[in-house]
Amino acid sequence: MITFEQVSVQYADAPAPALSGLDLTVPEGELCLLVGPSGSGKSTLLGTVSGLVPHFTGGVLRGRVTVAGRDTREHRPRELADVVGTVGQDPAAHFVTDTVEDELAYGMESLGLPGDVMRRRVEETLDLLGLADLRDRALTSLSGGQQQRVAIGSVLTVHPRVLVLDEPTSALDPGAAEEVLAVLQRLVHDLGTTVLMAEHRLERVVQYADQVLLLAPGEEPVLGEPAEVMAHSPVHPPVVGLGRLAGWRPLPLSVRDARRKAAPLRERLDGRAPAGTPATAQTATPTATADRLAVRRGPVPALRGVDLTLRPYEITALMGRNGAGKSTLLGSLVGLHAPASGSVRVGGRTPHRTRPAELIREVGLVPQDPRDLLYGESVAAECAAADADAGAAPGTCRALVERLLPGIADTAHPRDLSEGQRLTLALAVVLTARPPLLLLDEPTRGLDYAAKARLVGILRDLAAEGHAVLLATHDVELAAELAHRTVILAEGEIVADGPTAEVVVSSPAFAPQVAKVLAPGPWLTVGQVAEALRA
Ligand SMILES: Nc1ncnc2c1ncn2[C@@H]1O[C@H](COP(=O)(O)OP(=O)(O)OP(=O)(O)O)[C@@H](O)[C@H]1O
Ligand SMILES: Nc1ncnc2c1ncn2[C@@H]1O[C@H](COP(=O)(O)OP(=O)(O)OP(=O)(O)O)[C@@H](O)[C@H]1O
């Protein structure tokens, strides 16, 4: 269905090709998962299929890519729209209408489908993606995850033969991610749709893949059975890490398969406990507090009666369904939203009444879309500005970028960076200021496991020095790895608040893979298990 013949892509000014030597076929009716480190060329590869590369991105495409027999270099994306549906990494950037319902219908309208078919498919899709209550809403008023659902829905309504999806679950809560993947699997099995999908959170997707295509810089692309590729892949989900550690063959790809093999490991671990996270200073003066905080976003009561205290030395994960109010809470802590009632204090100040120049000494936010923070013309300029704003020694920000994700060019324009590279830059800009309170909104989009591990290291160091960290995330593995404490929001209210191990294990939606495999044991991460086995 999709063929690549000797494909390579070279962007202007880039030192090396983003993609080279790609020679393979994705058969009809299969779900092919594209994996590889940040910046390895996944989005570029997807772009050659949807026609965005090189028509919209620039650069030179060599070789030939065909989809359903059409050469993507000779057909612009519009002329491929009846066969290929594409969801990019930044859904909001590609919306063409103003409301949810119009957006879902738009693709069908441009293909001239009959009105009754359009009506039916819009209704089906609203239900399928949990969007029925939002049908009349302006797209700009949606939360990040709600926008991503609309973007996925708008390509599903067209029933294209090929779906090209770039990190389609990155902003989705765990439940929604499972639902979307179940829908995709049904399209593959029942309608013979071909799906090509890039994703970093392999724990969510690898068990649905028929084939895995691994890209790694400087190495030949590898296409194969998921279990075979995972046995050697540098990026792999926790269940595979556990399987490799325990020597399970064949390698399990799902929690269910791993549980079947786990009895001996559970016995070996019996009577041991994970090394506890160091106790935090409960007595320290709070860094920030919310007191009966209520915030409205338009007509929506986004936060209701929120009581929260954030302390130095503590890393807190903020979790909850799409639209639960996570971004709103982070925004309130940096003064973006005034309380409707109740109060919020950060470093003794009231954020929405504090001048930005003063507030940045108290609190820094890495927003859900890192573009909101980046204005420079190059990586070097952005870093120099960050050093100056923070009064940090020249080179501080650049060193942080290098530590998080090595190899990003100084001269690159932030606009041209891969998703993970851009997030890395935004993280470094905020970390340069070393504010006492650090807020991160979904900080692992586009990041591979190695970059995530380095981010974990940096945040742990900051917490150990007395910074308070609050991260809103759908990444249950990250929360398990990093957070001392987990707070769960539901419809604007806090419904759970306690030590991460207790909060996440008691909830199937938020439990990490290792906890599910080794339940009822107290284990959350592969690292904890490895350490216990060494001891
Ligand atoms: N339009 C462009 N101009 C110049 N360089 C680009 C452009 N788009 C991407 N690149 C570079 O090409 C390389 C591959 O980027 P790509 O977005 O394909 O990676 P990726 O594997 O999708 O990364 P991520 O996992 O972070 O999304 C990166 O080094 C990136 O900086
Ligand atoms: N301008 C607005 N008008 C109406 N409703 C809004 C507006 N802005 C936000 N909302 C709603 O407020 C609620 C909270 O949004 P918020 O972005 O805080 O959610 P979230 O928990 O961060 O979600 P996600 O996980 O999807 O990022 C959502 O239901 C959202 O649709």
Image: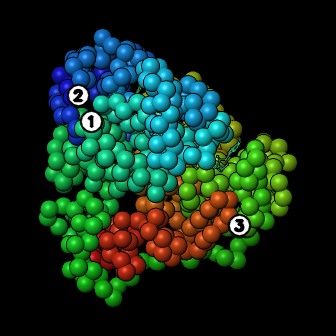
Residue 237, by quadrant, is bottom left
Q: Is residue 416 visible?
A: no
Residue 31, by quadrant, is top left
Q: Which mark is residue 260?
A: none
Give the Cα separation between the discs numbered 2 and 1: 9 Å
Residue placed at 34% from the left, 30% from the top?
Answer: 160
Front-most of residues 444 and 430: 444
Residue 209 location, x and y as percent?
A: 26, 47
Q: Which residue is mark 1?
A: 194
Classify mark 2: helix, strand or loop.
Answer: strand
Disc 2 CB within 8 Å of nearest ligand 1 atom: no
Is mark 2 in CB contact (under 8 Å) with mark 1?
yes
Q: Which residue is mark 3?
A: 308
Would you call the spot at circle 1 few (<14 residues within 10 Å), some (14-19), or many (20 or more)?
many
Three-letter amino acid code at the position of disc 1:
Thr
Classify mark 3: helix, strand or loop.
Answer: strand
Residue 13 location, x and y as percent?
A: 40, 18
Would you call the spot at circle 2 few (<14 residues within 10 Å), some (14-19), or many (20 or more)?
some
Name, please, the residue furthest toward the top: 74
Would you call the spot at circle 3 few (<14 residues within 10 Å), some (14-19), or many (20 or more)?
some
Give the Cα separation between the discs numbered 3 and 1: 46 Å
Q: Quadrant of the C terminus?
A: bottom left
Q: Which residue is mark 2?
A: 2
| 259 sits to left or right of 440 | left
Give the Cα separation between the discs numbered 2 and 3: 51 Å
Residue placed at 70% from the left, 53% from the top?
Answer: 302
Give ligand 1's quarter of the image.
Answer: top left
Front-most of residues 191 and 426: 191
